[in-house]
Image: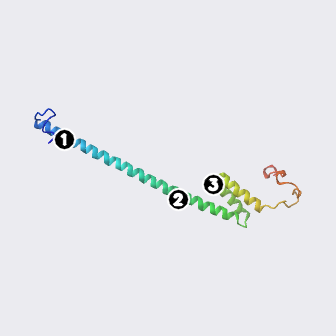
């Protein structure tokens, strides 16, 4: 064995030999234990990543469902449902430009121009010249 002789070729005492064998065993056990800990940490990290990916996919599915429902509400005959659809779109969207584009397209197709009613502007007034709703008296 490698521990029977020291590097100079002299014989090693039995007690020193046992200590050397125990030191080698301890080192090997520590190395194996470290590898087990590293493998466990890697497996936990992978499991966490899979869980995060699954959660992200589920959240995207929920947002898609809510988006579809909100767009469906825009086609309702009831005013309250349409307003709810506009609000729902605003609250669920991460990309505000997309929502603003959808809402603007909806309003352009649903609102008559020129507006009708007793206080409506003349038919030849451009859209940008009309006061916004927030500036009108309540």
Labelled disc at residue 58: 2
**Quarter holding residue 127:** bottom right
Closest to the observer, 61 or 2: 2
Residue at 66 percent of width and 65 percent of height = 72
Dot 1: element: helix
Q: CA distance from mark 1 to mark 3?
A: 64 Å
Pick whichever of labels 1 and 3 is earlier in the sequence.
Answer: 1
Number of residues whose C-alpha sits closer than 10 Å to that of mark 3, classed few (under 14), some (14–19) or many (20 or more): some
Query: Which numbered disc covers residue 93?
Result: 3
**Which residue is tagged 1?**
22
Q: How many marks?
A: 3
Which numbered disc flags the more N-terminal residue, 1 or 2? 1
Dot 2: few (<14), some (14–19), or many (≥20) neighbours within 10 Å?
A: few
Q: Calculate the distance from the C-alpha at mark 2 to the C-alpha at mark 3.
A: 16 Å
SS for dot 3? loop
Residue 36 in picture, x, y percent from top left:
31, 48
Q: Is residue 28 left or right of residue 84?
A: left
- Of badges 1 and 3, nearer the viewer stands 1
Please tell me which residue is depicted at 70% across the width and 63% down the height of the picture.
74
Would you say 30 lies left or right of 48 here?
left
Contact between labelled residues 2 and 1, with CB atoms less than 8 Å apart: no
Question: Could you say where residue 97 lies in the image, as x and y percent from the top left?
Answer: 67, 52
- Of circles 1 and 2, which is in front? 1
**Residue 117 circle label:** none
Label located before the other in sequence (2 or 3): 2
Question: Along the line of sight, which residue is nearer the eye, 27 or 51?
Answer: 27
- Foreground pick, 89 / 50: 50
Quarter of the figure with the N terminus: top left
Residue at 73% from the left image edge and 56% from the top image edge: 104
């Amino acid at each position: 064995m490698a521990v029977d002789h020291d590097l100079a070729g002299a014989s090693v005492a039995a007690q020193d030999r046992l200590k050397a064998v125990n030191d080698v065993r301890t080192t090997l056990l520590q190395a194996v234990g470290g590898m087990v800990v590293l493998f466990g940490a890697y497996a936990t990290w992978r499991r966490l990543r899979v869980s995060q990916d699954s959660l992200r996919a589920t959240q995207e599915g929920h947002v898609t469902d809510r988006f579809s429902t909100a767009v469906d509400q825009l086609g309702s005959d009831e005013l309250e449902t349409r307003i709810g659809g506009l609000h729902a779109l605003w609250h669920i969207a991460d990309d505000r430009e997309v929502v603003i584009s959808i809402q603007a397209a909806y309003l352009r197709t649903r609102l008559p121009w020129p507006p009708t009613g007793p206080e409506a502007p003349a038919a030849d007034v451009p859209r940008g010249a009309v006061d916004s709703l927030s500036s009108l008296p309540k």
